[in-house]
Amino acid sequence: MSRPKLGQSVRRSRWSHFTAQNVPSLLALLILIATLVFYAVLFSTSLGRLPGNFELTSTTNNAMPLVFSAVGQTIVFLSRGIDLSVGGMMDISNSLAATRMGGSPGSMVLWSIIILLVGAAGGLINGLLVALGRLQPILVTLATLSIFQGVAIKVLPQPGGKVPTGYTDFLTNPGHPWALIFIGLLVLFWLAFRRTAFGVAIYAVGNDEESARANGIRVVRTRVGAYVVGGMFAAAAGLFLAATTTSGDATAGDSYTLTSIAAAFLGGTTIFGGRGSALGSIAGALVLSILISVLFFAGINQLYEDFYQGLFLVLAVALSALVGYFLRRKK
Amino acid sequence: MSGQRNGRLSSLPALRRLTPDRRRTLYAFAAAVLLFLIGALVRPGFIEPSSVKSILVVASFVGFVATGQAFVILIGGIDLSVPWVLNASAILLVTSSLGQDDRAAEAVLLCLGLGLLTGLVNGLGIVFLSVPAVVMTLGMNGIMQGLTLGLSKGFTCHACSSSSPAVVRDAITNNLLGVPADLYVWLGVVLLVTFALGFTTFGRRVYAVGNNERASYLAGVNVRLTTVVLYMLSGLFAAFTGIALVGYGGSPSLGIGDPYLFQSIAAVVIGGMSILGGRGSYLGVVAGSITLVALVSVLQAMNMPDYGRSIVYGVVVLLILLLYGREEREV
């Protein structure tokens, strides 16, 4: 544990300030590139060609639900919270999409909006209980997870239902990697979002609630807002999940609670608030998804998938902590 | 002031004289009794000795896991690796004993050793690699899941079809003076842990670390050792529950540990422990475990469908938390 000394940050140049602030995100990007290279090498040695359109498309499409849920989780993390109900909200969203959505464009747009609003409403419940009820986020979202899972099973008691083909083609086109556009939009959204008053307020509240309050930030409103946005992203993740699987399952989203937390951590965002970025989490989500393909081409039994994902998560976060430690000591 | 915070109940003079910890423990037991009474109204047979005994046996499994979880929550940590440490232990018990009594002792020791080992790795990672507890134990859960699935070939191995050794089964299910042996085991654990936390230096150290890590370090507490030991205990209790569940059900299955993660955390918190550490009594955790299982049993007695049970479960947990789980107002 090194204690920061006074006046150090003032002397640092702009560039080193930037790298020091963004070590975890940059590290996540490096890990992503390394994973991609490793994947390409393994792929080409086993199949004798470079990964092409098909591989890119399927990897991207499969990663979309995790990418969106991880971004939502990140926004809640930044406000010094945690959202364990992500999986339950994805279940609701997935079940609604598979049972209610019609084939016409109007119905698809309408239901997408309704589902996003349901996500916002779920987030609102979480946020109000956390900020006004003064309950611990981990407990609130644990309870709402159970509630959301119940609602999802009510909506869709048996796995089934059908998502319109047009919807799948639009969100996660099986023929072309068009889903990359959504990742690009997400990056643009984030760059704009963190510069808005609301985005800055989330960072401020996550860093130091008292100082934020003293500086005129509406803490309660900001924290509730973080959960609302988080809930909407979880609902969007559920929509992508419904689009890739083309059918509904009221429990398909459950695993995303923990993987979204893993992706956010891998991307350098911590639950202690105010540190990190959704860009890192997007990279983290992509790494976790590509890792599955890497394991496949490395000839590793699929049953060991969780083992390597768990190991990778721990090592990456430990590495990030070590790098941060040495950077701080070097000064 | 405290009257407002804890509802009207605590304005009674007799209750106000109790410490907040004692009051919460009392509330948790009152909630359990209340649920049994509601159960009796719904179905007269609900509070017959045989029914109460079977509810308590199921509650004991939550109680065992929650004991380990309580240890780490007391120091402000959390153990998310519970589900698959439990599951791995359950499967290891039958695969190593092959259901034979003469191998049972070694198999049980092997399982408990596995629990201690995973806890040791968790603790070392948290203490020395400075990986946050959430990530370390989440990663460990994946590692154990992957290893269990991989090594048992997806639970299709030859030895996997063995069932529990008769000795283990008897030690859990046999009646002694009309009470299942498992409840004596639980009673023993409760007495031992109450003693350890309330009347030993170890217990004082645990609460000290949970209240203020730095202050307890300066006061001469070996914070690192304490942390590692507590995670080892959590692993030990998870592994022990795996053994007990196999003894109870006869054979293990994949995913038997999954419900115990959220239940153990909920039981600890309903029992009045602070998720931030340092506060709460272990007897409350016992009451919390009984309350949770009694709640599920009441809902079952009401013939409530799955989805309704899940929703009511979440709502009741929220209500209990709102009643007394709230943080003190900061400003």
Image: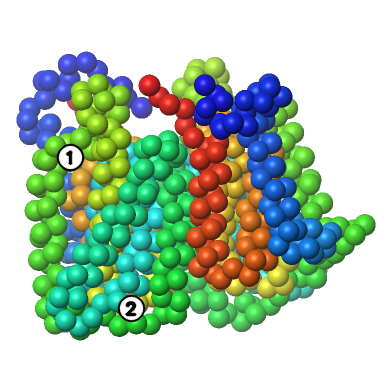
Q: Amino acid at mark 1?
A: Phe
Question: Do the residues under discs 1 and 2 have CB atoms within 8 angstroms?
Answer: no
Between B104 and B84, the one nearer to me in the picture: B84
Residue A1 position in % (x across, y down):
36, 27
Residue A119 position in % (x across, y down):
30, 58
Q: What crowding class fits label 2: few (fewer than 14 Cα within 10 Å), some (14-19), or many (20 or more)?
A: some
Residue shown at the point (59%, 68%) measured from the top left: B304
Q: Residue furthest left?
A: A14
Residue under numbered circle 2: A99
Residue shown at the point (36%, 38%) measured from the top left: A131
Between A53 and B175, the one nearer to me in the picture: B175
Share a chain, discs 1 and 2? yes
Instruction: Give the chain letter at badge 1.
Output: A
Instruction: Give the chain letter at badge 2.
Output: A
Residue under numbered circle 1: A198
Q: What crowding class fits label 1: few (fewer than 14 Cα within 10 Å), some (14-19), or many (20 or more)?
A: some
Judge left or right: residue A214 versus residue B176.
left
| Quarter that holds the C terminus of chain B | top left
Between B148 and A239, the one nearer to me in the picture: A239
Residue B83, quarter of the rendered image: bottom right
Q: Residue furthest right?
A: B177
Residue B107, quarter of the rendered image: bottom right
- Residue B73 visible to an observer of this rendering: no
Between A8 and B177, the one nearer to me in the picture: B177
Measured along the vertical axis of the image, is residue B30 above or below residue A303? above
Judge left or right: residue B269 versus residue A268.
right
Judge left or right: residue B224 versus residue B183.
left
Residue shown at the point (47%, 27%) measured from the top left: B328
Measured along the vertical axis of the image, is residue A101 above or below residue A92? below
